Image: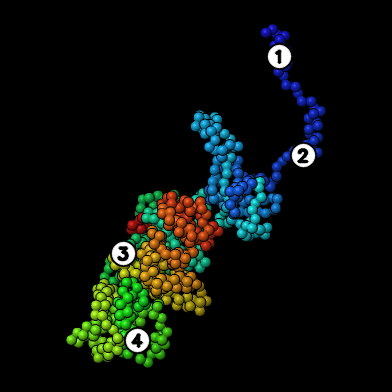
């Protein structure tokens, strides 16, 4: 090719410049149309926009599309603000699904995308993509402040803005005295709940499998409740909490505390109470006190249920109880003759809640023995243990013979169960005092009822029944005194460990009176600043009646899908994405739902600063 031909070809390849007249015409048209497009200044800072609804859209949720540059700015469970400009409304929402990355204009499983993903070395062939999240609407923001339930939906193409950490904490209402941990997806938001009448006296459920972190959660809460002046009572069936007065020495726990900037520390003001004649799991504790059970504090209907008496045994038990009660009245044991106050109290006595004052287990055994001897026609005279019955034997026999009774076998079986209780040597003992409820309900006092050295479930349940009744009675008196003095009452929280053993569905079926006592405590207690915390690794054994008493929840890992589905029917407000993650939670993670929080949260529970004897 000669030079002339090259010059000709070069000129043909040159791009002709745009005439100035055309540029001037375009500029004029832009100015006439309103000037250069600048975007909506109100959209500045938006990280996504709402999508159109489809046939698969759900009420209360909207789909949001994101450019790929902002996908990492909106993690799961984060909060957003949606400004629906066309109808001048502003909404708050939470990301409940996603963020998901989707290719632009293609299905994610299309052959082109799959091939580009597998064969695209170094992402050379990677398709452009965008993000998608599903946002659940929390509420609509009012112009003058405040949030109301959303009655409408954001319109399509509404800009979406992430909330700052401060705004998120304010919307979720995560402030309070008791620090639970850090909100997942919000590393700088601490989840707290207030230790006030509006929260913790509303009963708490701490559920989870073995090793999920329940004990860590409970001990950490108690350590802070004590500092807030709440009186805490543990019903500790395993002795696990008997060393919480000491700082933790567990290596993993110490490392976790250091990462969170927390200090190992024991719980102040702890006292261990153990049944007389039984050992505590921590004999080195500086303050241990043995205690006895008082038969007079236990409702006869509760006792007969816990002893699992048959129908005939139950009938004879109540016969012996009624005769014993009449004799104690006849002999001036209670009410004391001439004591008008005691006589009035005796008339108002509710035997569904309490026993008969000053009646001991040995009193009842004496009367049941006389019944047996009369029915069996034993030729020898009865030989009661108590002197008051020995000295008035004719009067005792007269009362017994006035009651029509039979079945020597049933009386013998009943006596066998009563003597079994007596051989525990914990009822009405002179070797130990009753539980000092007044001391236990002082501000910041932590009382650990150590039942670990007791193999008998009947004995444990009798001890728990007496404690619940005694605490309720004392808190009623303390509440009235506080109101009369014009001061707030001392809040009290009772932690029932292994609650499924005490309040299983089968036990409630067999022991309706005992459950009614617990239900009364739950209903009255909330108004008297008395809260119950049910802790269990087998929530499937808790009946619906118990679940219905609980207002606040800390749900650790629960792997049984049938249990999760049952809990979903009892606990409202937890979105599907949190329920689906419940079976895969790591130790220390929990779904937290409290009445003080605007919505349930997935929380990394803080490590406990105190020592546990048997960490799950």
Residue that badge 1 annotates: 9
Point out which mark residue 35 bears: 2
Q: Residue at x 39, y 69 (%)?
A: 509
Q: Residue at x 36, y 76 (%)?
A: 301
Vertical order, 519 against 399 (above or below): above
Vertical order, 126 against 223 (above or below): above
Disc 2 crowd rating (10 Å Cα; few below 14, some 14-19, many 20+) is: few
Can you tell which of label 1 and label 4 is closer to the viewer? 1
Q: Which x, y percent locates residue 338?
A: 37, 92
Question: Which of disc 1 and disc 2 is earlier in sequence?
Answer: 1
Q: Which x, y percent locates residue 146?
A: 63, 60
Question: Do tag 2 and tag 1 residues touch (Cβ < 8 Å)?
Answer: no
Question: Which of disc 4 and disc 1 is earlier in sequence?
Answer: 1
Disc 2, SS? loop
Residue that badge 4 annotates: 334
Give the distance between the C-alpha atoms of the residues marked 3 and 1, in whole angstroms. 100 Å
């Amino acid at each position: 090719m000669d030079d002339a031909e090259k010059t000709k070809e070069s000129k043909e390849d040159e791009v002709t410049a745009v005439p100035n007249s055309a540029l001037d015409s375009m500029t004029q048209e832009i100015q006439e149309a309103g000037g250069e497009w600048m975007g909506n200044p109100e959209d500045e800072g938006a990280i996504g926009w709402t999508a159109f609804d489809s046939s698969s859209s759900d009420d209360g949720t909207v789909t949001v599309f994101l450019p790929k540059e902002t996908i990492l700015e909106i993690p799961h469970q984060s909060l957003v603000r949606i400004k629906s400009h066309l109808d001048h409304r502003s909404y708050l929402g939470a990301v409940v699904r996603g963020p998901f990355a989707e290719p632009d204009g293609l299905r994610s499983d299309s052959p082109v995308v799959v091939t580009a993903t597998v064969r695209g070395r170094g992402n050379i062939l990677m398709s452009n993509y965008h993000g998608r999240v599903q946002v659940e609407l929390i509420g609509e923001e009012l112009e003058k402040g405040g949030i109301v339930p959303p009655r409408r939906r954001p319109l399509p193409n509404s800009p979406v803005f992430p909330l700052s950490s401060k705004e998120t904490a304010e919307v979720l209402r995560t402030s309070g005295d008791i620090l639970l941990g850090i909100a997942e997806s919000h590393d700088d938001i601490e989840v707290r709940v207030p230790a006030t009448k509006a929260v913790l006296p509303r009963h708490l459920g701490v559920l989870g499998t073995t090793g999920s972190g329940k004990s860590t959660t409970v001990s950490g809460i108690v350590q802070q409740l004590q500092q807030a002046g709440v009186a805490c009572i543990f019903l500790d069936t395993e002795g696990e909490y008997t060393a919480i007065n000491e700082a933790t020495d567990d290596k993993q726990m110490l490392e976790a505390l250091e990462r969170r900037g927390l200090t190992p520390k024991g719980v102040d003001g702890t006292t261990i109470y153990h049944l007389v004649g039984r050992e505590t799991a921590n004999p080195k504790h500086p303050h241990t006190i043995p205690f006895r059970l008082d038969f007079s504090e236990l409702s006869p209907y509760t006792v007969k249920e816990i002893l699992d008496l048959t129908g005939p045994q139950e009938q004879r038990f109540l016969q012996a109880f009624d005769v014993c009660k009449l004799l104690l009245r006849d002999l001036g044991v209670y009410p004391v003759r001439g004591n008008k106050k005691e006589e009035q109290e005796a008339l108002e006595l509710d035997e569904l809640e309490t026993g008969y004052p000053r009646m001991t287990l040995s009193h009842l055994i004496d009367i049941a023995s006389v019944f047996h001897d009369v029915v069996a026609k034993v030729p020898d005279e009865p030989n009661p243990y108590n002197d008051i019955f020995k000295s008035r034997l004719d009067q005792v026999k007269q009362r017994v013979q006035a009651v029509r009774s039979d079945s020597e076998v049933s009386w013998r079986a009943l006596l066998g169960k009563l003597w079994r209780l007596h051989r525990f040597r914990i009822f009405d003992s002179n070797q130990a005092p009753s539980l000092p409820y007044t001391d236990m309900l002082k501000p910041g006092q932590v009382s650990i009822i150590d039942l670990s050295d007791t193999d008998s479930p009947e004995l444990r349940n009798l001890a728990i029944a007496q404690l619940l009744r005694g605490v309720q009675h004392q808190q009623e008196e303390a509440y009235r005194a506080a109101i009369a003095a014009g001061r707030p009452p001392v809040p009290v929280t009772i932690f029932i460990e292994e609650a499924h053993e005490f309040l299983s569905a089968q036990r409630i079926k067999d022991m309706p009176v005992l459950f009614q006592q617990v239900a009364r405590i739950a209903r009255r207690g909330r108004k008297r600043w008395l809260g119950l915390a049910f802790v269990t690794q087998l929530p499937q054994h808790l009946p619906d009646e118990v679940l219905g008493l609980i207002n606040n929840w800390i749900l650790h890992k629960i792997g049984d899908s049938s249990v999760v589905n049952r809990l979903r029917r009892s606990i409202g407000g937890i979105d599907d994405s949190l329920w689906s993650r419940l079976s895969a939670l790591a130790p220390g993670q929990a779904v937290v739902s409290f009445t003080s929080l605007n919505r349930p949260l997935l929380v990394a529970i803080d490590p406990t600063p105190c020592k546990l004897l048997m960490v799950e």
